Image (cartoon, rainbow, N blue to C red):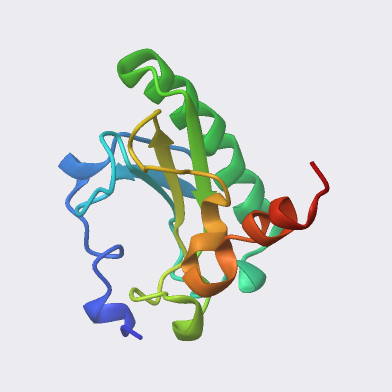
Amino acid sequence: MSSLSECPFCTLPSARLLFRNDAAFVVRDAYPVSPGHTLVIPVQHVASFFDATPSEREAMFSLLDTAKHQLQAKFGPAGYNIGINDGAAAGQTIGHLHLHLIPRNPGDRLDPRGGVRWVIPDKADYWTERDRAQPR
C-alpha cells in the first residue's frame, strides 16, 4: 500500500474536491464505473475503516448523504452501490480509506441481482440453483 508521501488522496489538488467537512471530503472517482461514481475520503491518512475514529466515520457518513442527494439531483440514478475495499485481499489498491458511492441504473448490468456479491463471481449467483430446486 502507499506511503503517506505517495498517497494520491493525501496530495489531491483542492480543485478536485466537491465538498468537505472537518474530517472528510468528497471527489469523483478518477476511474468511474458509472457516471457520478464518487469517493468519500477521510482527511487523515488512515488505511482501514476499522482504524478510523468514530468521528471520522460519522463525518464520512454525513458526506455520503450529501453526495447521494447531489448525485440524485444531477444524474437521477435508480439505485446505488456503497462499498469499501478494506485490505489488499479485498481489492484495496490505495492504502487510504475511501468509500465508493456508485450510481446504478437499469441496464448498466444485464442482471444486477447480487450487487456487491459479484466481487467473487463464482459465489455471486446464489438464486439460480435455489430457483431450480423450487417446485413449480
Where residue 93 sits: x, y (%)? 34, 76
Q: Nearer the viewer, residue 15 or 104?
A: 104
| Residue 105 left/right relative to 54 | left
- Quarter-of-image position of residue 36: top left
| Residue 94 left/right relative to 49 | left
Q: Residue at x 25, y 34 (%)?
A: 35
| Residue 48 left/right relative to 7 | right
Q: Nearer the viewer, residue 105 or 47?
A: 105
| Residue 114 left/right relative to 80 | right
- Quarter-of-image position of residue 28: top left
Where residue 79 sits: x, y (%)? 50, 30
Q: Nearer the viewer, residue 102 or 44?
A: 102
Q: Quadrant of the N terminus?
A: bottom left
Q: Residue at x 54, y 56 (%)?
A: 116
Q: Residue at x 60, y 54 (%)?
A: 56
Q: Is residue 76 above or below residue 93?
A: above
Where residue 69 sits: x, y (%)? 48, 21
